[in-house]
Image: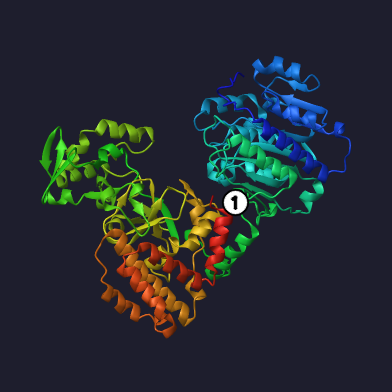
Amino acid sequence: MDINKNQLSQIFTPDYIAEFMVKNVKNLYLAKQNIKILEDVKILEPSAGKGVILKYLISEGFKNITAYEIDQKLETSLLKNYPDVKFKFDNFLGSNPNEKFDIIMGNPPYLGQNYNAQIFQELKENFSICKKYFVGNMDLFYYFIHLGIDKLKPGGLLSFITTNYWLNKSKKTGIKYLKPHITNDCFMIQYIDLSKIKVFKDAKGQHNCIFVLQKKNSNEKEKIIDKYIQVIQINKNKDPNPLDHQYNKLLFSKILDRSNHNSIKIYPSALTNNDLAHYDNWNLLYPREVKEIITQIERFCIENEKIALLGDYFSIRNGMILIKDEIFILKESDQILIKEDDILININNEFTKLNPLEKKRLKKIYKSRAIIPYGYYSQELEGYVIYFNKFEFSKLENGDRESKISKIYPNLAKYLKQYEQDLAGILKNAKENSRDIYYPRRGSHIRQENGRSLINLEPLYDKSPKIFFKFISHDNVFGYAMDQYYATSDTYFLWSKKPTEFTSLFLLAYLNSNIVRFIFKSRGLAMKRSKTKIEKGIPLPIFNGFESKEKNSIIKLIQILTKWLVNSANSISDYEVHDFRDELESTSHLNNPEKKLFKEMIIKAINDKSEEDIQSIVDNLFYQLFDLDGKRIDYLMREYYYD
């Protein structure tokens, strides 16, 4: 099988990284093994490249080294520079899994399956390890980990530098076999986070890590022995003068010397090996002192002896997935004209007036860039989506549906008929009904929890309170709308599964609060299209935990302040101070004379129209509600999660 170096995205390991990895794994191995003679330690380098790791293995005293390299162009120089290394110029993935080693280390090639399906198909056909562990959405280096684990002796160490995306992936996103293989056969004993620094000069997406696995022996497997995971977190260079490699080299030398540096954090993860789930996110950057805060938050989220999660109460679903956005989302002046109460649509380059029923089929639609905390930017209107509701025609057959649509909505039907061939072709390729050219593909309904019936979302999009967020986001920004708000597929909506004791305003405030921001950062909940982390990662407060009169009055005050934030974010109306004061007076939390200064602070923030100050007040109320120290949370955020 011929895979050239461009296909393998061959990027060579920097010298200082190779030196660090060799010295680091040597220290770890000697600390765990009663061995003095390095010549007896059997080493494997599965992707030798130019041999930089080999250079440091030899200089550190290792002798029994085997190395694989697929690039034939490197053969001459490797044989010349490292004559004592046992080279195999073959694909490592075809090597014998029964040949065992004490240490395996390297920088395996990175190649995503999504855009290289043919290469992965050939790998499956040629190598048994690839056939055994292939799964969609994987990366080539997964195979190197699988085979590396198989080739390790019990107690042996595997150390690779890879991208870090696989740690945050779930079963549906490529790690179906990888994480179970690691947790069943190995301990993760060290994780070094390199995502804040640039390691490879020419590589895209500098989100790397170095990890060290230790192969379990039969006793450790049988007794389910647990081990802690050492985390080393490296922060980026704040000094613009030193070059990246100089800064990096300094930091790695400090780690080896066990010297202190303000850009290095070393701690045991609050997750131990027995906490690592087969198919979920491995959030290793989770210090124990951070876990203490999370545990305190979760104390108020207990229902039936379990922690209630956002996904227990809400279904999280995309907005509109249309057959083709360019056809269904109508832009003013191009596809439609709006003249006072009339709307005209472009059919075959002529603008035709829509009837009253047709106008109701046009809905305001937004992309995720419109979303802001507590609301949305109305000026970011993407256009007007043609929204035919299948529920309106649910009792009709396909042919009768078309006939009725053409009768009730003649001009919209003519408009879509212009693109019938294109729309039907898209549906056919997606193995969907090619006659359904009038409807959204997804996002018009959701299935109820029991799975038996569908919920029509049109009335909810049109008039009900809605909470939504971007499907790619690094922070907890949750928008809100009570008026008509439809969104494209890059937006997620929260749809209620079952009743909650709290109002939508309280939930909105909680989701936008500093408490949830802390949860977001500490649990690595940054959104990258996958909603699973949000569903399973955000604990939901249960009102039984707030039984005191004082805490109930805090909840009421949070809701009043959130109402102001919603009005402010959406420019619905000016919230008069005297109206607001009346509502404040009704909360027992502010009736105490000791709260006089606090009440004045709130009134001043309203007078100043300061959303930032009101948000700060809401955050402090949540700290009181959850019995938390806000200063402690701010410290931990600075210490671990901000550059």
Number of residues whose C-alpha sits closer than 10 Å to that of mark 1, classed few (under 14), some (14–19) or many (20 or more): some
Depicted 513 relative to depicted 22: above or below: below
Amino acid type at image mark 1: Asn
Whether residue 307 is visible to the viewer of this picture, yes or no, is: no
Depicted 200 relative to depicted 320: above or below: above
Q: Would you name the residue on which mark 1 appears? A: 283
The image quarter in which residue 10 lies: top right
The image quarter in which residue 431 lies: top left
Q: Residue 289, image x and y in percent?
A: 63, 61
For this orientation, the residue located farthest to the front is 241
Depicted 103 relative to depicted 290: above or below: above
Whether residue 302 is visible to the viewer of this picture, yes or no, is: yes
| Callout 1 secondary element | loop
Task: Please give the count of numbered marks on the rendered protein.
Answer: 1
**Between 45 and 327, which is closer to the camera in this rendering?**
45
**Between 195 and 491, which is closer to the camera in this rendering?**
195
Q: Horizontally, is 111 left or right of 455 in the view? A: right
Q: Residue at x 73, y 47 (%)?
A: 258
**Between 449 and 237, which is closer to the camera in this rendering?**
237
Q: Residue at x 41, y 55 (%)?
A: 477
Q: Residue at x 74, y 27 (%)?
A: 54
Q: Residue 516, image x and y in percent?
A: 49, 60
Colouring style: rainbow
Q: Residue 578, image x and y in percent?
A: 26, 76
Q: Horizontally, is 604 left or right of 331 in the view? A: right
Quadrant in the picture for the N terminus: top right
Q: Residue 369, image x and y in percent?
A: 35, 47
